[in-house]
Amino acid sequence: MRRRTQRFSGSRWSGLLMLMVMMALLVMGSVSTARTARADSSGSMHVVVPAPSADNKTVAGPLHTNVSVSASQVTAGATYSLGWAKPSDGCANGFQGFDSGGASVTADNSGTFTATVIWPGAASDTTTQYLICARDTANPTTNVITCDQQYQVLVAGRPHFAMAPVSKTKGTGYSAGGAVRIDGINFVPGNTSIDVFVTTSATFAAADFQPDLALKTQDGSPITSDAQGSFTAFVLLPLSPTGQLFLYVVSADGAPNGPTPFLPSLVVNHAILIGQAQPTPSAQPSPTAKVPVTQKTPKTTFPDHPRRIFAIALLGVLSLILFIVGGVLIASVALKPRTPPTMNSGERSMPDVVRTGREW
């Protein structure tokens, strides 16, 4: 009986021991699984530019939008590739890299990174809200981060603008200080504030977005797209520099001066050749009607002063000659002898009658 009791007790203890070992293994497995799950979902990422919606769930814009993200609590020193995916596929299974090969960024020692990607034409469905993804290139299936916001394509096209000089000039069509008309489309969402810059560079950096240096409009009003993303603006070109430059039309949502600079979400440019400023024509007085005056053509080609002197001398000589001729004539008349009067033969001289006394 004792043996049976001892055997039963030993088997009971051995069973308890086996149960404890199994429970320990299960706990260790669950802990390992929990750690793996935390590693798979570690870190967070959110969109900085464009500005998220009021509910912080989406960002929106056209194709070719600059989408800037910021991530934290990720694996320090790990390299992440950035991409997009349809919600039905998820970031782990439906990852599509940006720019075909995918953009990549390395997290710093504190486990953070920032990056800017261009929304691709391959993700152009306006009825889909796309996921924005980041995955560890060393662990692409286990260490995947899904952004807090999804991207909504508002129009399946890029932002675009056309420009033309307001007034034609000689040589180049654009002159320093002159006005330019700009017509833009697809600058969505509607009511987007817009700035215009002229730079010497073919690329636009985050530091180039300086609102104080934006070109002024002719009437001083701000530039804003309408509900469909279109706008027309008349801006004044700078006086310098001149030559081959680049005119940029950008959305006014860049962040150039913070700890991490971010590009505006919409950036479009065209090359522009700006010539020297055209002189401003001076105001001319309006002509008044005048009575035509007939002028006599001078007989001589002497200048004014010599001609006057010659005329005075000529008059003096003529006066002297006339004076001399007049004197000669007067002298000849005075010196000529007088001729006694003669009487005709038919006439008799009547002597004077001397009357004395009374006549009879």
Image (spheres, rainbow, N blue to C red):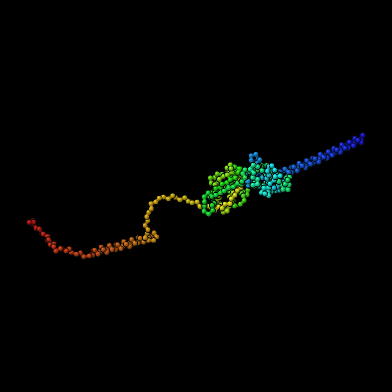
Q: Is residue 354 left or right of residue 232?
A: left
**Image coordinates for residue 158, horizontal then vertical, percent:** 61, 47
| Furthest residue toward left | 360
Quadrant in the picture for residue 228? top right
**Which residue is depicted at the point 8% across and 56% down?**
359
Q: How many marks?
A: 0
Query: Relative to the observer, which residue lies in front, 155 or 279?
Result: 155
Give left or right: position of 307 versus 168. Answer: left
List x then y, in percent, for residue 241: 57, 52
At 29% from the left and 63% from the top, the residue drawn is 324
Quadrant in the picture for the C terminus: bottom left
Give the x, y percent position of residue 16. Answer: 85, 37
Q: Is residue 238 visible from the viewing direction of this image?
A: yes
Q: Quadrant of the N terminus?
A: top right
Q: Position of residue 344 (x, y in %)?
A: 15, 63
**Residue 254 in view:** no
Viewer-closest of 245 and 85: 85
Closer to the camera, 280 or 86? 86
Q: Is the residue 311 above or below the residue 229 in the image?
A: below
Q: Residue at x 65, y 46 (%)?
A: 122
